[in-house]
Image (spheres, rainbow, N blue to C red):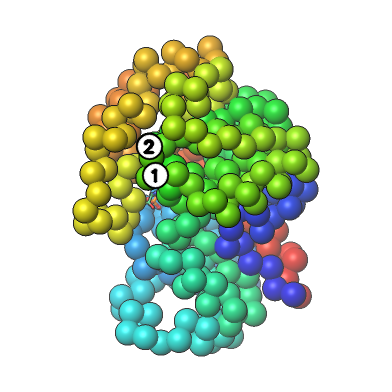
């Protein structure tokens, strides 16, 4: 059966560890792995904007010996009603894998339903699992491992990053706490799934509204924009209720003394995070961005090796 990576929990704890081990090896021997030599092609499709995801997949596929086809979907039939399952089915005749950034999770599920090659979620409204592989690689590097470490995500707890921290953090055996204002809480089914995973990995999950309680003694403090792509005109006040959740020196003061700071970028400096947090000694943000490259190369290699 074709293996897809649509959500963080599409990798078991053992598989997630395998991918992260491979990512670390690929980082230390950057040009020494060419599983896509041929070259085999990978389609990288965007319904939404991107800098990091777009460039890191393009570069990573080339470094693996493959041929990246990076396409903005407005030049395709995606936006005018072509059945997405048909698109997945057709693309599978051309390429070794499909990477897609899109809106609803139903859209990527439709592509995957038609595809006979791996489909990788490069961000949907619900999840950002490739980002989490990079984040976990960064936590391994900075904190010496993931199991037993505590991670606090503060801000818009209803968004894709919050959901992915819950699922991927629990898979990695972390103690995950997410905190956001009322009305910006994670989906109940995602929390329930993360709790179930955590029960098997020794991790734990807590959903809070108090940012100070969330970050207390945490090893990792993470945040993200308060306005995700597509939410710009949703009519909600996306500033005032979030102000207590800003990652700044005062909030970091409640975390563990050696705590690191993560942000998937792009950042709205002065909103969800201050300049000194992004640029200061506790920031792992730019390693985190670099690690997208290594983590996605490992993910592609892993999924292709699993695919008949
Ligand atoms: N973090 C992230 O996914 O960045 P881009 O939107 O620039 O790809
Ligand atoms: N939550 C953000 C992440 C951007 C990488 C968004 O979806 O826009």
Q: Residue at x 43, y 66 (%)?
A: 104
Please name the residue that numbered disc 1 is placed on.
184
Q: Of 252 and 66, which appears nearest the observer?
A: 252
| Classed neighbour count for the residue bearing mark 2: other residues with Cα under 10 Å, few (<14), some (14–19), many (≥20) | many
User: Height in image: 23 above or below 307?
Assistant: above
In the image, 105: left or right of 234?
A: right
Please name the residue that numbered disc 2 is placed on.
181
| Classed neighbour count for the residue bearing mark 1: other residues with Cα under 10 Å, few (<14), some (14–19), many (≥20) | some
**Picture coordinates of residue 94, whole percent (x, y):** 56, 82
In the image, 103: left or right of 297?
A: left
Q: Of 98 and 158, which appears nearest the observer?
A: 158
Q: Secondary structure at mark 1?
A: loop
Q: Of 184 and 200, which appears nearest the observer?
A: 184
What quarter of the picture does the N terminus occupy?
bottom right
Label 2 and label 1: CA atoms lie apart by 5 Å
Q: Residue at x 41, y 37 (%)?
A: 180
Q: Does any portion of residue 199 appear in the rendered image?
A: yes
User: Height in image: 33 above or below 287?
Assistant: below
Q: Residue at x 52, y 48 (%)?
A: 163
Asked if the residues shown at circle 2 and circle 1 are in contact, with their CB atoms under 8 angstroms apart, the answer is yes
């Amino acid at each position: 059966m074709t293996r897809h990576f649509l959500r963080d929990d599409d990798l078991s704890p053992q598989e997630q560890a395998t991918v992260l081990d491979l990512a670390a090896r690929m980082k230390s021997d950057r040009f020494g792995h060419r599983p896509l030599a041929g070259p085999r092609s990978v389609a990288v499709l965007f319904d939404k904007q991107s800098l990091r995801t777009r460039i890191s997949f393009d570069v990573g596929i080339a470094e693996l010996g493959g041929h990246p086809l990076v396409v903005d979907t407005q030049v395709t039939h995606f936006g005018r009603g072509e059945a997405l399952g048909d698109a997945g089915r057709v693309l599978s005749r051309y390429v070794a894998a499909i990477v897609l950034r899109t809106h609803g999770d139903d859209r990527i599920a439709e592509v995957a339903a038609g595809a006979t090659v791996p489909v990788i979620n490069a961000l949907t409204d619900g999840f950002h699992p490739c980002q989490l592989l990079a984040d976990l690689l960064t936590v391994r590097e900075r904190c010496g491992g993931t199991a037993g470490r505590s991670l606090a995500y503060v801000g818009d707890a209803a968004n894709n990053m919050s959901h992915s921290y819950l699922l991927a953090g629990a898979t990695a055996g972390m103690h995950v706490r997410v905190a956001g204002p009322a009305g910006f809480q994670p989906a109940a089914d995602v929390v329930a799934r993360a709790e179930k995973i955590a029960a098997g990995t020794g991790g734990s999950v807590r959903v809070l509204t108090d940012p100070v309680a969330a970050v207390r003694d945490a090893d990792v403090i993470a945040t993200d924009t308060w306005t995700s792509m597509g939410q710009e005109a949703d009519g909600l006040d996306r500033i005032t209720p979030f102000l207590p959740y800003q990652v700044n020196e005062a909030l970091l003061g409640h975390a563990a003394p050696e705590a690191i700071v993560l942000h998937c970028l792009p950042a709205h400096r002065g909103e969800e995070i201050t300049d000194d947090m992004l640029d200061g000694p506790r920031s792992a943000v730019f390693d985190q961005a670099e690690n997208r490259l290594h983590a996605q190369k490992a993910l592609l290699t892993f999924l292709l090796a699993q695919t008949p």
